[in-house]
Amino acid sequence: MEAAKKRILTRKRNKAHVRKRVSGTETRPRVSIFRSAKHIYAQAIDDEKGLILASVSSVRKETQAQIEGYTGNKAAAGIVGKLLGESLKTKGIETIVFDRNGFLYHGRVKSLADGIREAGVKF
């Protein structure tokens, strides 16, 4: 149990360290992600107004229809990223600030970021 607590506290410390410097606006929102064992979630946030501009997750029925099989892998994360990128493009958002939320930029987090880039959004 000690190792699990330490891992959670380390992620929270990393998250606080990044959030001191990263902030989103209406024209360049912050894309925050959360990764659980089974799913991945992403949302574009305007921190100035406190609004969520777009959100996509592997939990939604529409997303699961596009994901074949398990939702907790890199392929599913790439699809979620691509859907979020397309949603942002339809709202006229070209650039974002990527907030990895304390998670390492590796595996599913990297796959989600690549999916957003595939849709044509820059960061």
Image (cartoon, rainbow, N blue to C red):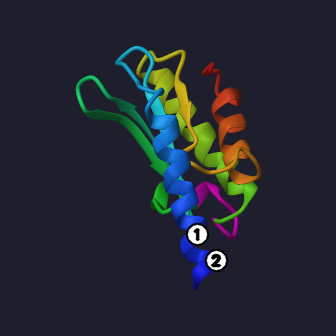
Q: Residues within 10 Å of mark 2 (few under 14, many from 20)?
A: few
Query: How many callouts does the rendering have?
Result: 2
Q: Are marks 2 and 1 in contact (CB under 8 Å)?
A: yes
Q: Residue at x 72, y 62 (%)?
A: 73
The image's mark for residue 3 is 2
Across and down, in percent, residue 97 comes to 53, 25
**Most foreground residue, 89 or 28:** 28
Q: Which residue is mark 1?
A: 6
Residue at far bottom of view: 1
Asked whether residue 33 is drawn in magenta, I would say no
Q: Quadrant of residue 86?
A: top right
**Most foreground residue, 15 or 2:** 2
Magenta residues, dominant SS class: loop
Across and down, in percent, residue 8 comes to 54, 65
Across and down, in percent, residue 37 comes to 61, 70
Secondary structure under tag 2 reads helix
The quadrant the N terminus occupies is: bottom right
**Most foreground residue, 63 or 33:** 33
**Most foreground residue, 121 or 104:** 104
Amino acid identity at mark 1: Lys
Q: Is residue 40 above or below residue 84?
A: below
Q: Residue at x 64, y 77 (%)?
A: 3
Across and down, in percent, residue 15 comes to 50, 46
Query: Which region of the structure is painted magenta?
Result: 65-71
Amino acid identity at mark 2: Ala
